[in-house]
Amino acid sequence: MLFFNGMYHHLKGHSSDLDRRLFQHSARIGAAWFAFASSGAPGSGHAATLGNIVLKGCGVIALPLMLSACSWSWFGLNSPPRAAAHSTGWLSVAPARDFAYMPAIEGRMSPNRIENTAMTALVLKNDINQAVRESVANRLKVAGFHLNDGRKVLSGNIEKFTVDDVRSPALWTLKMRYVVTDSATQKVVFSTTKTVKRKSPKFTSSSIAIEDTVRLSVDALVGDSGFINAVN
């Protein structure tokens, strides 16, 4: 009975009303069977044998019910995972021309090339700012943001985009400055710089590696409460 009491007080603080009612019902069944099995006359071999059989039967019946009622919360083995907080917002993503690729603007790199360390140049068919802009918009859409609201506009500067690809895995580095502007007042309501690094196999497709690296950057942006407040 001490075991039942301890289990009940634990459930009282950690389980649902249904779990507690089921446990109490199971405990009553167990107590009744125990009283019945112990009611034989002292010294009666028949009563002792019957008691052993009944107690075993009680264990078979009551134990699954108690474990079901507890949902293993007594042992901490079946606690439901907490859902991650999900944020959303309303905005639009500026065109590619408003995602400045700083290495190209500064004359250090052509608009469609990413700085890399291997002998072979890493050149895309499209400009880097276009590839980054599309990846940013796609990731925000997948994350649940509404991109058809022009009141807040997201733009940015691609301050650094490099890959150390002499050896495998290649290390991609992206430093992005994000800016949210109120289209009515043209005032900046939020800005931040996010730097992310990602490893990928050396011969991974450049477009896939870029998309995956931008995804990490956007995830860092979405995790910023200042950004969430700016687009809500």
Image: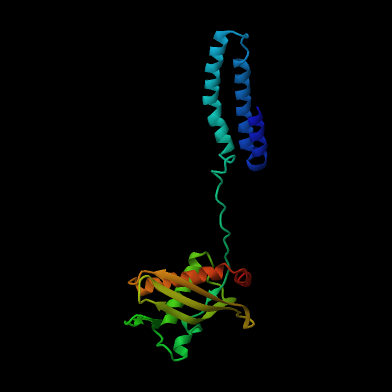
Residue 54: x and y, percent? 54, 18
Quadrant location of the N terminus in the rendered image? top right
Residue 168: x and y, percent? 35, 71
Quarter of the image holding residue 184? bottom right
Number of dots carrying numbers: 0
What's the residue at 60%, 19% (across, down)? 33
Residue 101: x and y, percent? 47, 84
The answer to which of 206 and 90 lies nearer the viewer is: 206
The answer to which of 184 and 121 lies nearer the viewer is: 121
What's the residue at 58%, 8% (across, down)? 44
Q: Is residue 64 above or below residue 200?
A: above
Quarter of the image holding residue 118? bottom left
The answer to which of 149 and 171 lies nearer the viewer is: 171
What's the residue at 40%, 77% (across, down)? 164
What's the residue at 64%, 42% (across, down)? 14
Q: How is the image coloured?
A: rainbow
Quarter of the image holding residue 131? bottom left
Task: In the displayed orientation, state which residue is furthest to the bottom.
Answer: 107
Left or right of 183? Residue 128 is left
Q: Is residue 109 above or below residue 174?
A: below
The answer to which of 48 and 150 lies nearer the viewer is: 48
Residue 122: x and y, percent? 35, 81
Q: Is residue 229 above or below residue 2?
A: below
Task: In the displayed orientation, state which residue is furthest to the front.
Answer: 43
Quadrant location of the C terminus in the rendered image? bottom right
